[in-house]
Amino acid sequence: MGMDIHQESAAVKGLTALAAEVRHDLARLNHPPNPWTLPVEGPDRRPALDVLVVGAGMCGQTAAFALLREGVSNLRVIDQAPRGAEGPWGTFARMETLRSPKHLTGPDLGIPSLTFRAWWEAQAGEEGWRDLYKIPRLDWLRYLLFVRDVVGVPVENDTSLVRLWPAEGLVGAAIEGPGGSETVHARKVVLACGRDGSGGRRMPPFATGAEGRLFHSSDPIDFSRFRGGRVAVLGASASAIDNAATALEAGAAQVTLFVRRSHFPQVNKSKWAAFPGFLRGYAALDDARRWAFTTYMMGEGTPPPHESVLRCTRHPNFSVRFDEGWSGIEERPDGLVIETAKGRHSVDAAVVAVGFDIDLTRRPELEAFRDAVLTWGDRVSPAQAAANPEAARFPYLGDGMQMLERVPGQLPELGLLHVFNWGVTLSHGALAGDIPGLGIGATRLAHALVRDLFVSQADAHFPRLVAHEDAELAPTPFFVEREAR
């Protein structure tokens, strides 16, 4: 939000008042409820966590908030990035505005005063909301931080997950934080590490070396270094277009977008799927129909937003080369040569913007579990897997987004790991990554974790039921005081 000093002061007052309103609304909803889980010791005889949430971006913080709403407070939420750099919004996302319509909800979990609209109106008023076209990217980040702070999600920044392992019915986790290394044990682990946490960055096999000139779109890139130079971008995604636009706006003399397709996709098929019936019902479909829905959408591709395209086409020094993927990259002292089937192109820098792979076996922190993970490739025919290799690598998840064993009984602790990033899409739909399904996804995840946490301790809860004494017919202190008045 661009504001003068008076507008900024009014915005601060508005947010202060909104924070008080949110806290009042949460109190009306009896938040936070009383904790109800029972203590568990780890193999080291130290108290174990109920849940370790790995990742504190949009998905991680919303999952943690959903758990807090259910009385699960014995949790930790860690993120390797410093505050404000969790997820893509303040780092490698380079769009001006979000693709999603401004009215969508999710991180609020159904609390009106926690919606983005409430946050915006607290600063700009109802007229400001009417005048808003789409959500500016950095304002979305500021909004997420507001939600985190006002609801009390306890995020530990600059703290990384190193590895996980099965530990006598629990999950052991080695983490590195400002205070050094430590080992914790948890009854459940939620993997909310974003697109990268689903596998890793996708790079062509020939795209190696050339440090400082060859980048993945998720890298920190100082485009001003290439002012007056030539920049090549590979990809047809929103990320590719936004990287090209950022290079143009930084003063690149020539930016060329290389697209393997013959044209941009024209229709965003996944937009059709953003209605309650699909988001809530998709996971109940049989494998054949889930596979058909999602592989169709994946095959159709997603067009870049028209706003992003206009950012590029307003520059006369921007061009697109369709039907021209890269086949090699040659590094030279003064730059790079991009090789394609149609020719060679000398550039000063190149950006690969073809997204992220889905492949949990690539994640180093999952080394102790990777051989046991059931994937969609194990559930469909070899021909289907060969025709859709990316879809085949998605983990095949249970009803609570938990990983399942390829061989039942091989590694039971695998089911204590719950995925809450793009890896859920084949099994549950786009409930952990895209804003429309976020609230449904976080609530489904939290309900499954609460169910499992209770069921695993049901026998210990029963004697607490028997010992419960709260005489309903005895007068309460409030009743006695009222009668005395």
Image (tube, grey):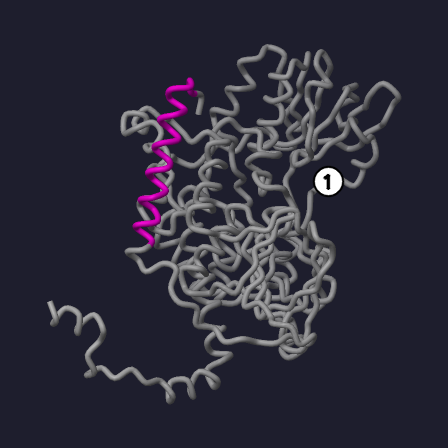
Rendering coords of residue 147 (x, y %): 43, 44
- Residue 145 as seen in the image, left or right of residue 330: left
- Residue 110 as seen in the image, left or right of residue 473: right
Along the line of sight, which residue is nearer the eye, 87 or 303?
87
- Residue 125 as seen in the image, left or right of residue 291: left
Above or below residue 224? Residue 453 is below
Rendering coords of residue 227 (x, y %): 70, 14
Q: Element at badge 1?
A: loop
Image quarter where the N terminus lies is: top left
Above or below residue 386? Residue 101 is above
Span colored in magenta:
3-26
| Pointer 1 residue | 203
Q: Which residue is drawn at 60% across and 31% down?
A: 236
Instruction: Report if residue 16 lies within the magenta region.
Output: yes
Label 1, residues with CA under 10 Å away: few <14, some 14-19, many ≥20:
some
Amino acid identity at mark 1: Met
Along the line of sight, which residue is nearer the eye, 107 or 103?
107
Would you say the magenta stretch is mainly helix, strand or loop? helix
Instruction: Report if residue 23 lies within the magenta region.
Output: yes
Query: Which picture quadrant has residue 371?
Result: bottom right
Image quarter where the C terminus lies is: bottom left
